[in-house]
Amino acid sequence: MINSFISACDRIPSELSYFSGSITKLNLAENSLSGTIPICLGDLSKLVELNLSSNVLSGPIPESFRNLEMIDNLLLYQNKNLTGFSPEMCHANTIIKFDCENCPSSSCSCHNDGSKVICV
């Protein structure tokens, strides 16, 4: 239901934060979403997987993503105008995979080798 609503938009609605205690996976890949990533996505406390890949998002990756303590997969690749990647984002959480390949500020993928997260 949420994905159907978002597909009709061209941006990520900040109202998603109303579901902060219930959303565990959010896949918004390939929806032609534009604009910035809302800071409030960092309030989705139960989020385990966030896929915003293959859109036209721009602006900084929100520092609030450090609050996503349960996140395993954070996929931001193929967004040509995202900036502000910080390697600490990989290490601040339990991230198993962080991929922001083809983002202009960096080309970084983080993968957990079983003992630590590695940025390559």
Image (cartoon, grey):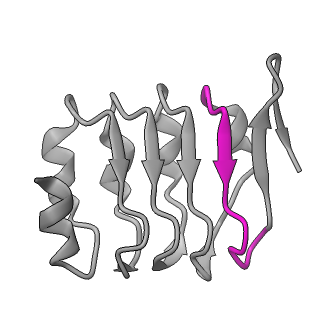
Residue 17 relative to residue 29: left or right: left
Residue 120: give x, y in percent of width and height: 89, 51
Residue 5: give x, y in percent of width and height: 12, 66
Residue 87: give x, y in percent of width and height: 76, 48
Predominant SS of the magenta segment: loop
Which residue is farthest right? 120
Q: Which residues are magenta?
A: 93-106
Residue 10 relative to residue 42: left or right: left
Residue sitting at 55 percent across and 32 percent down? 72
Residue sitting at 46 percent across and 35 percent down? 68
Q: Is residue 35 above or below residue 106?
A: below
Which residue is farthest top? 115
Does the segment drawn in magenta span residue 105?
yes
Q: How many numbered circles are shown?
A: 0
Residue sitting at 66 percent across and 40 percent down? 97
Does the segment drawn in magenta span residue 43?
no
Q: Is residue 115 above or below residue 18?
A: above
The image quadrant of residue 86 is bottom right
Q: Is residue 92 above or below residue 7?
A: above
Residue sitting at 37 percent across and 57 percent down? 39
The image quadrant of residue 23 is top left
